[in-house]
Image (cartoon, rainbow, N blue to C red):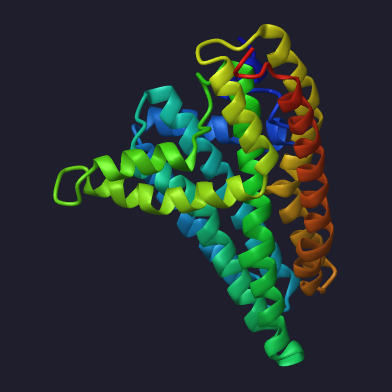
Amino acid sequence: MSLKEKVLATMKSRDTESDFELYVTRTPGYLWALLFQTLHVHPIAVTLMSIVIGAAAGYFFYFDDLRMNLIGMALLVWANWYDCADGQLARMTGKKTLIGRILDGFAGDVWFFFIYLFLCLRLTPTWGVWIWLLAAWAGLHCHVLQCNIADYYRNIHLWFLSEGHDSELTSSRQESEEFHRMKWMSHDWFHKLYLFFYIRYTQRQERQCPAFQRFYAHLRRAYPTTLPATLRQQFLDESRPLMKYTNILTFDTRVGVLFLSLLAGVPWVYFVFECTVLEALRYHTIHRHETFCKRFDQELPNESD
């Protein structure tokens, strides 16, 4: 197998990955994963290293100095390679754990917390309290919702692509039922704590796309075991063009604009970009997805049929 084929074998689907991610992110991540596999490094250790490196990157964005900013950029790219490598390593070695999944999802949050913090500290002498308010809206509202819906739409696409076999698509109702079956005073306490927060994460995703929720519930009632191949293909044909938007809403484009704003000496542009361009794209993506979900829902057989 060629290197490209080996990298593709570690990915869930080519549909949800852009060419940029394949060559600039996934391939270096795979090479790191091979090295860590040879050195018998556990995936969780790789995740922890990515968290530390990504957090350190934020510190270098505090300085109004291009050389320091370039160091921060290099560290953030390095952290992202490790963030890819931990998942690839886990699939290669079979060392998948709940804490690993939690830490992997937590890593990006830590990176951006420190990026936002140090950018605000850098810009406070000029902007005062206003930069903190702008950053809070950009990060706690825009960034969170954008990444939530992008992750959700990817999982929906993977669910239809693999008929649920290679997707993390779940519902808050199912997670709540599992949460209530568990006891705090048992060996499940850590999983229960994880579900407590993950249920709220899933609920934020579900609230953004009510038409899909109705369609998905109707679909599972109409076809409880196997989806018709034609319906699956029709949904994928509608969903596939939106995957490029989910890629834009996650890491690469976001960080590209961050780097350009730092190179230009106007880091506040990054916050404005999140609040305007990415928010407009989020609304556009949701509108298109909700529109075809309503159509598919109307075309499903009625329960009385």
| Residue 271 horizontal side relative to residue 191, left or right | right
Task: Provide residue 30's location: percent of width, then percent of height.
Answer: 55, 30
Q: Residue at x 76, y 90 (%)?
A: 126
Which residue corresponds to the image point at 63% horizontal and 63% vertical from the top-left?
A: 72
- The x, y position of residue 80, in whole percent, is 59, 47
x, y percent for residue 87: 48, 34
Q: Is residue 141 above or below residue 198?
A: below
Q: Is residue 240 above or below residue 267?
A: above
Considering depth in this image, is 4 or 38 the residue closer to the camera?
A: 4
| Residue at far left of view | 185
Q: Residue at x 50, y 32 (%)?
A: 168
Work out whether residue 140 or residue 109 is closer to the camera in this orientation and state it: 140
* Position of residue 240 in the picture relative to residue 165 (left or right): right
Q: Is residue 5 visible?
A: yes
Q: Is residue 27 visible?
A: no
Q: Quadrant of residue 76?
A: bottom right
Farthest front residue in view:
304
- For the point 77% across and 53% down, which residue is it? 256
